Amino acid sequence: MNHLLRELAPVTDRAWEEIEEEARSQLVVSLAARKLVDFSGPHGWERSATNLGRTEPLPATPVDGVDARRRRVLPLVESRAFFSLSRAELEAVDRGAQDVDLDALAQVARRIALAENTAVFNGWPEAGITGLAQASPHDQVPLTEDMSACPRHVAEAVEVLLRAGIEGPYGLALGPTVYRRVIETTEHGGYPLFDHLRKILAGPLVWAPGVDGGVVVSLRGGDFLFECGQDLAVGYHAHDADSVHLYLVETFSFRVATPEAAVALPSR
Amino acid sequence: MGTEQYHEPPEELSQEARTFARMCTSLIEEAEAINWYAQRLAIERDSAAAALMRDAQNEEFKHFSMDLEYLLRRTPRWRTVAERILFQSGDILEHGEAGEEAVDAGNEDEADPAPAAAPPALGGSLGIGSLRGRER
């Protein structure tokens, strides 16, 4: 048994499969950052920190004439979100029910994905994580509600990256509101705005809960580094006569190696 | 024919283990196809035919790589080893040793690559990993 303690849960193999399938399907849709940044791992539950390759001075050493520096590392965040499922519903899985209520799991999956996206795009100061949008040294290119101006804004962001010597292809993370506007908009002649933006970027548009407006990022690699210790998993917390209490967990760090490789397009 | 890819009685294997076996078989078949095209290309004198074979071989490279990525995403211990060997410059043997050490140090209690039962599938991980290349 590992740290997830799953064998202690009153959950059958079939119910576990159903839980995992629901979690996976929700997470794959919502985990926007993983669609755009470099992913390293999973390195396992035991991984505690990311090597930064840097040191910091120590104010004193125990013996004169000895110089010492301390290695700097970025600790991994342990992100966890609890949920409860009805035991009666899980028993229904074994009877072949197709409409099992796993809404609590779906909601938590979206929340933990939102936390991951937010950390990567906007940062998480308490965890020592700087988001790629906030790290960007470039002037922001605000997106307006006028979608006819959107191609110009995105092209401007791409040009900023080109001027900075950042190669493509590029990807565009869009917050849900802007994403919806993009996919429902056609330009003069009926050409879908979505396809136009893809041509400008030569890369994907990603639905990204947690993003304000949009962020254009280079996909050339090596610029944005997501390090995963324990990849997303479902663990067991407790149970009673009516419910099983579980949680989704992951450990990760994120760092920006090339701040110039992103341009933020916040909603105005 | 359909069950030759199984080493153990298929009815005793979980759905996940059967998928794992099918993908491993696909990976082997793609590698075989790459090898066959390499041999054909080595002796082909017609440049047009050789161009077609190269194109077909490129397809097999793609299929092999996709199969491998699928398997790595669902097998954390394999992935841990592969990450230290693939696309690295330097001594392959040394990287292999590093990969073995990493997996020995970090995943001792993890289940086998293709566990027979769901818990703890992938050591409990959902096997999501990188989603690069996915738009939705």
Image (cartoon, helix red, strand yellow):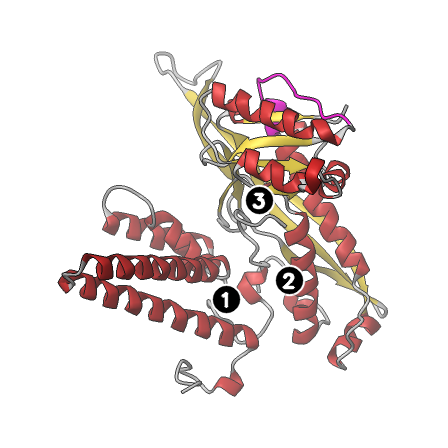
- Separation of disc 3 and disc 2 at Cα? 27 Å
Q: Which residue is mark 1?
A: B111
State the residue in front, B136 or B7: B136
Q: Which residue is mark 2?
A: A5
Q: Are marks 3 and 2 on the same chain?
A: yes
Which amino acid, by three-letter code, is at mark 3?
Arg
Which label number is shown at residue A225? none
Residue A143: within the magenta?
Answer: yes
Which amino acid, by three-letter code, is at mark 1?
Ala
Q: Earlier in the sequence, mark 3 or mark 2?
A: 2
Whether residue A162 is situated above or below residue A173 in the rendered picture: above
Residue drawn at 59 percent across, 31 percent down: A216
Asked if marks 1 and 3 touch (Cβ < 8 Å), the reply is no
The boundaries of the magenta stretch are A131-144
Dot 2 crowding, Cα within 10 Å, few <14, some 14–19, many 20+: some
Asked if marks 1 and 2 touch (Cβ < 8 Å), the reply is no
Whether residue A2 is situated above or below residue A249 in the rendered picture: below
Q: Which residue is mark 3?
A: A34
State the residue in front, A218 or A6: A218
Looking at the rendered image, the quarter that the N terminus of chain A falls into is bottom right
Q: Secondary structure at mark 3?
A: helix
- Separation of disc 1 and disc 3 at Cα? 25 Å
Residue A80, image x and y in percent? 69, 48
Residue A141, image x and y in percent? 66, 21
In this image, A243 relative to A49: left or right? right
Q: Secondary structure at mark 1?
A: loop
In this rendering, the label closer to the viewer, 1 or 2 = 1
Which amino acid, by three-letter code, is at mark 2?
Leu
- Separation of disc 1 and disc 2 at Cα? 13 Å
Magenta span: predominant SS is loop
Residue B105, image x and y in percent? 42, 52
The chain letter for the residue carrying disc 2 is A
